[in-house]
Amino acid sequence: MDFVEAAIAAASERRSKRKTPFKDEDRPLVVLSYAQSLDGCIGAKDNTQPLRLSGPESMRLTHCIRARCDAVLVGSGTVKNDDPRLSVRLDNHPPSVQPRPVVLDSRLSAVSSTSNVVTLNNRLIVFCQYLDSDPEFTTLQSKRAVLESHKVSVVNLASRHDLPDNLDPASSSDVSSIPIPLMLRVLKSKFGVNSLMVEGGSRIISAFLGLGSLCVDCLIVTVAPMFVGSGGVKAFDSGGEGADEGKKGQSVALSVVDPVYRQFGSDIDSGSKKLARGPAMALCKISKPNYNRSQIPATAVNNLHNMDSFTQWCLVCERKLNHDAVYCSIECLKTDFVSSGTFILPPSSPVSASSCAASSTSRAPPSPTNCPPSPTPSHGSFSDMSSSWSSSYSSSSSSNGSPDRSQMSRHEATQAILNPPFSLEFKSRRPRRI
Ligand SMILES: NC(=O)C1=CN([C@@H]2O[C@H](COP(=O)(O)OP(=O)(O)OC[C@H]3O[C@@H](n4cnc5c(N)ncnc54)[C@H](O)[C@@H]3O)[C@@H](O)[C@H]2O)C=CC1
Ligand SMILES: Nc1nc(O)c(N)c(N[C@@H]2O[C@H](COP(=O)(O)O)[C@@H](O)[C@H]2O)n1
């Protein structure tokens, strides 16, 4: 279908040109696609049975996206609720050629040997997360063995044995939330998945959208002309219990730039050309004095740590500093945000990219005069995390009068963020669209 091809081709091209602190080529191209009602629901009241929102034409679109991707991912909630097949069922599509189903089932509580994704034998991949010390370790290992006896590939992201050598296992204590960037890298490096369709449900959509262009390349949303009413499952930030609980009530600066709309039967589909989070909003979030780290999506925190994001961030910002204005991409801000919220640089900051690059290759701790230290993940408040920084920085200013953040004390650096002595300029910002 032209619409799908065009959207994915545009996303792919954009991705190849994008300068991010992360290596996009290490993960599959990600197409997030779901169907929602006019009141933003993807599921029925009480989340107890599947809700058909798409008409035949837009359902065909969904199957075209599945056909176009190597794998199709859902969360454990969707498996419990819908028992989906996740297969391509199109007239002209060979039934034997199918995307691999992928389920994020942290505690192996949803997928069983009778689930459609298992019995259809499309080489299901299940991601879970538990430590050897987990009180339920034996039970989880037994469940794993049963699934493996049904040809399911089970990956425990907390286990070194399950990961390629170049990836570090997940170390978060939040075992209910699969670290998405790490999971994506495993999909690519271990299973050769180059394109991934993410279908839902609500918490999975929220988690991916929360990571923005870090993990989503293309967004295709079907809007069906109906209202689900109160109690329906919201597409985004349903506020339900579980992995994204910390995001409840959090305003989200996410915009789709240059969207395109098509009508499929009675439904409208929106395909994104670009997905962007508003940097200003991200800054606003980190600027709240009482900012609580639990509000940061757990997935972002865990995975940015895994991705050794900090040193690469330095490289990106060095480029931006050449424009003589502060510019941080959302990836920068997000890294910021996770590392401790003190990384916004004044123009002409003396941070040296070459020394950061050197520390990136050696993985040695960066020198305090050049780069801030790599963050140590913590599970306390924002200020708890900040205190893990070195306190050896001394106060100073750079030659242009703006503070040399690399020489600041923790407290001063935090104050610089809360009350920046320089104006932040975000280049290439377009007005937000709703
Ligand atoms: N209309 C549509 O296009 C679609 C609708 N749905 C609907 O969505 C509903 C299910 O949504 P939810 O209950 O929210 O379940 P979900 O399918 O989003 O799964 C959420 C669960 O996945 C696990 N998980 C593991 N790692 C996670 C991470 N990093 N982030 C978030 N969750 C993670 C957690 O255990 C969490 O409870 C159902 O009503 C289903 O019918 C689902 C897919 C598409
Ligand atoms: N595109 C779309 N439109 C709807 O109206 C839907 N209810 C869904 N649901 C998704 O499709 C899964 C079911 O897939 P199978 O038909 O069993 O292959 C369901 O679990 C949701 O992920 N999608």
Image (tube, helix red, strand yellow):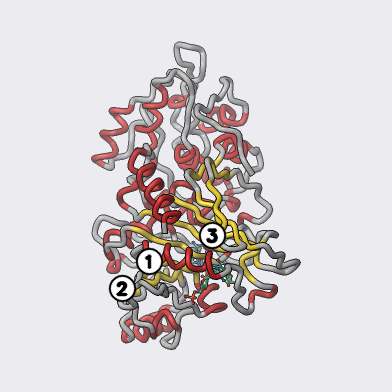
- Residue 200 against residue 392 in the figure, above or below: below
* Residue 213 x, y percent position in the rendering: 46, 46
The residue that disc 1 covers is 67
Q: Quadrant of the C terminus?
A: top right
Residue at 45% x, 51% y is 218
The residue that disc 2 covers is 97
The residue mark sitting in front, 3 or 1, is: 1
Tell me: is circle 2 under 8 Å from ligand 2: no
Callouts 1 and 2 close, C-beta under 8 Å: yes
Q: Give the Cα separation between the discs numbered 3 and 2.
A: 26 Å
Tell me: is circle 3 under 8 Å from ligand 1: yes
The residue that disc 3 covers is 205
User: Looking at numbered disc 3 in the image, what kind of residue is underneath it?
Assistant: Ile
User: Looking at numbered disc 1 in the image, what kind of residue is underneath it?
Assistant: Ala
- Residue 321 against residue 390 in the figure, above or below: above
* Residue 73 x, y percent position in the rendering: 44, 67
